[in-house]
Image (tube, rainbow, N blue to C red):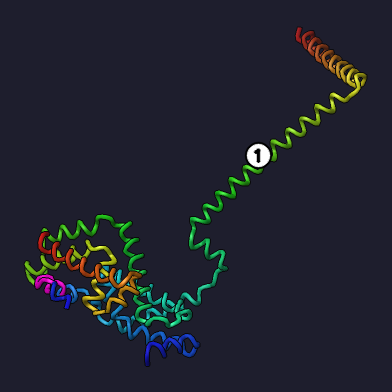
Amino acid sequence: MTDQALITQFQNGDSKEAAFTQLVKSHQTQVYYQIKKMVLEHADADDIAQAVWIKVWNKLDGFKQESAFSTWLFRIAYNETLNFIAQKKRLTAHHSQKELDHSLEHPSGHDGLKESTIQIKLERAIAELPEKQRFVFMLRYYDDFDYEKIASITGTTVGGAKANYHQAVKKMTTLLQTS
Amino acid sequence: MENESISKELVEALKSFETKTKQVPAGYFDQFEMDIMQKINAAGQAPKRAPIVAVFLDHKQYLVAASLIFAIATGLLFFNTAEKNNAAVAKVEMIQIETLPDELIEAYVNNNELVAEVEWNTVIETEAASLSDNN
């Protein structure tokens, strides 16, 4: 069954739960992984993903299908993730930076010293990207979303999304080389 | 393709980053939709609050602000009214004394003087009696 048919079924009130469950099953991994790339911790990603799907349940009746369901869904995920990051930033201003500094000084891991150091450097580089650039980069690089869809999700123009992607690549490359 | 502009080192790091982010607890996705439905059903069974109450409870700062404004407004209103009433009473009393006829005022003073004299005499006599008893 297509997303469109499932949404119609949900909106008509015919076995709402079944239609919704099917939508969750179809998109849950993609949404979760996108969120996890932004927040890194499973517990955080799980909290945000749950908040996203609860919001979808509450708002799906009013979804007019003017855009693809996945675009609408990722827009909710984007907003929920940004809200979460903003809240967490206020609570732990310098905590993660200190942890990363400590990890860099004492690298560990099963893949060997070099790889884990590069990994930590990358995580630091990703953490230093503005949230929008990070989100755009992940959607483009890992999920291969086109720029129009990314622009619609993040509320920017196609040119803006392209610029965000290239700036993210440039910053990560520079940070990997210099840090 | 734009990814060609990404350095080999970054590509490798991004690959292992993806592997890391794809690590989830076993069975997480099998359970996920059931967890969501449980939460949604639990929220649906919770007693619904009236919209205005919900707005205040969801934004407690508004409730505090509204209480403060109410308290200040009530205080100001009360003190203003009390002052106005006191001024009005004082004015009425002044007018009444001024409009009293002189005879009435004199009679009032005389009567009260007599009462006062009688009271003083009684006190003096009582004290004198007690002094003579002591002696």
Residue at 73%, 37% (x, y): give it.
B85
Instruction: Using a 10 Å C-alpha cutoff, classify the residue at mark 1 as few (fewer than 14 neighbours), some (14 to 19) or many (20 or more).
Output: few
SS majority, magenta? helix
Q: Nearer the viewer, residue B35 or A86?
A: A86
Q: In the picture provided, is A168 more to the left or to the right than A67?
A: left
Quarter occupied by residue B30: bottom left
Please give the range of residues in magenta: B6-14
- Residue shown at 30% from the left, 59% from the top: A89
Q: Which residue is mark 1?
A: B79
Residue B79 at x, y percent in the picture: 65, 39
Left or right: B109 in relation to A45: right
Q: Name the quarter where the N terminus of chain A is drawn.
A: bottom left
Mark 1 residue type: Phe
Q: Residue furthest right?
A: B103
Looking at the image, how many numbered discs can be counted on the residues? 1
Residue drawn at x 79%, y 8% is B132
Task: Give coordinates of residue A61: x percent, y percent.
Answer: 48, 81
The chain to which mark 1 is attached is B
On the rendered structure, is A57 left or right of A106? Answer: right
Q: Is residue A40 visible?
A: no
| x, y percent for residue A78 | 33, 71
Q: Which residue lies most toward the bottom here? A: A1
Quadrant of image for the C terminus of chain A: bottom left
Q: Is residue B106 magenta?
A: no
Q: Out of A117 and B7, give the one closest to the viewer.
A: B7
The quadrant where residue A39 appears: bottom left
The residue at 85%/28% (across/down) is: B96
Q: Nearer the viewer, residue A68 or B40?
A: A68
The residue nearer to you, when weighing A109 against B92, is B92
The answer to if B9 sits in the magenta stretch is yes
Q: Is residue A139 visible?
A: yes
